[in-house]
Amino acid sequence: MSRYKGRPGRYQPGLEYYLRRKPEGGDLRDPGEMRPSGSDLDARRECLVLVHGYNNHEGEAAEAYLGFRDRQYAHFGNLQPRSLEKLFGDAFWPGDADWAGPIDWVDFLFYPVAVGVAKAAAPRLADLIGKLPALEQVDFIGHSLGCRLVLETAAKLHAGGRPRIGRICLMAAAVPCEMVEPGGRFEPLLLALQAEGTKIHVLHSKKDSVLKYAFPLGQPLAGEPTRGALGRFGPPVDMPGRGHTVTDRRIAGADHGHYWGHAGNDASEEATREAGEFFKIGTRARGIASRADAETREIGNDREIDGELGW
């Protein structure tokens, strides 16, 4: 991980779920903060929440989110500028350390702590998502340990009864396979989502060096020994919903950082295209934009009528 030097200049999200106290390292913000930037949040009916992974400071997360946007605009060529901001909500959480100087390269030793942070962040993220009053459906896309935060948050939201969880995409998931099997931590959630028709798509790669070497060492230190990561081996054969509501795609040649679109290689291109198609981003973003335009015209007509009648 490089040192934090700010966010990319082009990165201007319409909605942030901000759970950090500092741009690099630091503790969880409690409560979290929802940061609108030009969005009409009270009217938002659906939201695709983007969740970065372990060892990403704020700038690296923003770069990944910008890369994902760039690839979606390139793939769905008729999207209007900034139309994705009416759909996306970017989560920032402190799954990284702030160890200065020559020891910064051993930030991976923070991983056992970061697992606990991901679990602790879930109720805060769920609370922020629930603050959108008109929200009917939430979707998630996560990467690495962010997939753990996604599943933990989905469990909190489902227990609370709203909003509906529509689709979940897990990229290079740093989640033990045992947790998505019968008897595992997420079996109750997966069974409930299967019954409700929630679709889950797992993007994985056996070329992932982080999940191959670091994950099996770090996970036992977090008190969760495992035979392997969901993001390396894909869905186990007995994962609830597999082959029906749970699907998967092997991303050929993908290493751990090749999923958000900013890596600029074939694997990154394939992963972001696969995710965009899974979420039907082109169709949904255009539909939201059309609906917003219609609502704006309707409000404008009402004002004209009000003026004519002297109200």
Image (cartoon, rainbow, N blue to C red):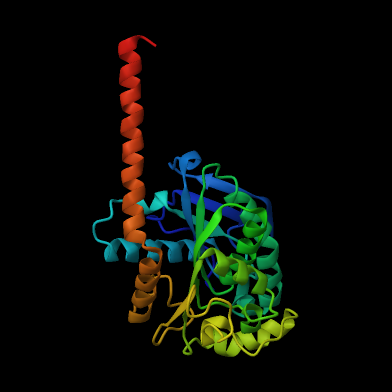
Residue 170 appears at what percent x and percent y? 51, 72
**In the rendered view, does 139 fall on the left or right side of 27?**
left
In percent of width and height, residue 118 lies at 65, 67
Between residue 231 and residue 5, name the one nearer to us: 231
Please identify the quadrant where the C terminus is shown. Answer: top left
**For the view shown, which residue lies furthest in the front direction?**
195
Q: Which residue: 24% across, 61% down?
A: 77
* Residue at point 52%, 43% (across, down): 134
Is 122 rendered above or below residue 304? below
Which quarter of the image is occupied by the N terminus? Answer: bottom right
Residue 202 visible in the current orientation:
no
Left or right of 139? Residue 102 is right
Vertical order, 227 against 65 (above or below): below
Q: Which residue is found at the position 52% from the left and 79% from the top?
A: 242
Residue 70's image quarter? bottom left
Residue 104: quarter of image? bottom right
**Residue 173 or residue 239, whichever sits in front:** 239
Residue in front for this viewpoint, 134 or 229 = 134
